[in-house]
Amino acid sequence: MREPVLVPRLQPFTSTIFSEMTALAVRSGAINLGQGFPDTDGPRPMLDAAKEALFGGANQYPPGPGRPELRKAIAGHRARLGLHYDPDSEILVTAGATEAIAATLLALADRGDEVVVIEPYYDSYAAAIAMAGATRRAVPLVSDGNRFALDVDTLRAAVTPATKAILLNSPHNPTGTVFTRAELEAVAAVCIEHDLVAVQDEVYEHLVFDDHEHIPLASLPGMRERTVSISSAGKTFNCTGWKIGWACASPELIAAVTASKQFLTFVSGGPLQPAVAYALEHELGWVEQLRTSLAAKRDRLSQGLREAGFTVWPSAGTYFVCADVRPLGFADAEELAWQLPERAGVTAVPITGLTDHPDEWNHVLRFAFCKRDDVLDEAVERLHQLRSIAPSGVDQARTR
Ligand SMILES: *Cc1c(COP(=O)(O)O)cnc(C)c1O
């Protein structure tokens, strides 16, 4: 066989940092705070609805755009936010948010086109842009010590005549940033000025804490017709393995996304679709409890990480909190992430693999708090060992 077999544009994507860290956690018996999946199930009636559908004959191809009751439930769910979509022409059910993102980028970005992403970015964004043959331009979030904020000037500077779309994720994985109205208005202004499509990944739309507010870009003036809004049941209903996602947009945009989606998977998750429809219509009370419980877990892990010696950025949403490793005397978060299972019996994810400027992010580790309290407590207890084994930090930080 000719070597290498993999086409050049996919060579950077042979493995993901999440699967590498999960494999390491399994190999070493470490507590996995690297990958963001919950360790408890979603609402029981949703699981029952899936079982009923499975034994009730819903096992053949569902309709291409998704089962009608699910599209109707998604429309109802969006309507809570004052956003009205026609279930027949403006909603497409996908194999998770991941397929919605890939299908959107394949449909909208061609060779020679550019897509602006906010970094650190979700790893599938980079791969999907590469599969489309397009080029990504990463705009780094900037820490003001208290949160990671959007740098609007850098965003403006990243747009060129070749830019087709801006892809952003709010609430934001991995930083826990929830974009403010002012930040989203700035994004909207850039999209409108340069006639760009906005793609908003809203998979954490319900997992927003304290008095922070999730604002869909599509709700801002002039954005409804140029935004593809993407979400998924996985994070909202603790069913990340189901891969039921969706895109909402204008008929023109949905028709474009459908053109690529139908030849990626055609359809998926037949018996799970009615269960997600049920959950969207009847289980938002359960989600509210999930949100409250996750806020408490965020506090629990953030506090524990601080006591173990990290500096921790406040997280306004998602499953994640970011921690600065430098106060513990480490200068290289990536190296620490590889050593963490052996040194402390815990895994976390370095942010470097999610950026185009790794040197600027190599002090940050992402920890997931979507775990049982006893798991979080045990992880924190183990992390206390780091202080005793850390190299005498200041010198190392200066010389590396
Ligand atoms: C988990 C996640 C996804 C993937 O969603 P699926 O529905 O599992 O495909 C997409 N974007 C972000 C930011 C995520 O954290």
Image (tube, rainbow, N blue to C red):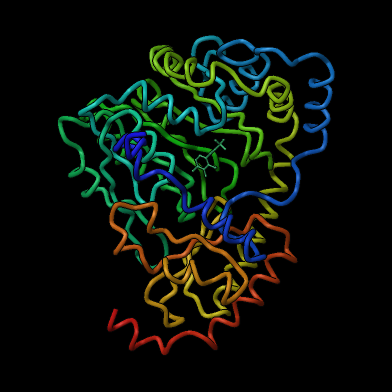
The residue sitting at 56% across, 49% down in the picture is 208
Residue 314, percent from left and from top: 50, 63
The residue sitting at 44% across, 74% down in the picture is 325
| 157 over 258 or under it: above or below | below
The residue sitting at 22% across, 31% down in the picture is 163
Residue 251, percent from left and from top: 43, 12
The residue sitting at 27% across, 83% down in the picture is 399
| 157 over 218 or under it: above or below | below
In this orientation, which residue lies closer to the viewer: 331 or 65?
331
197 horizontally vs 170: left or right: left
353 horizontally vs 343: left or right: left
Q: Is residue 210 visible?
A: no
| 154 over 241 or under it: above or below | below
Residue 142, percent from left and from top: 32, 59
**Image quadrant occupied by the N terminus:** top left
In this orientation, which residue lies closer to the viewer: 318 or 4?
4
Residue 391, percent from left and from top: 43, 86
294 horizontally vs 101: left or right: right
| 373 over 128 or under it: above or below | below
**Image quadrant occupied by the C terminus:** bottom left
Q: Is residue 243 visible?
A: yes
Residue reaching furthest to the front: 1
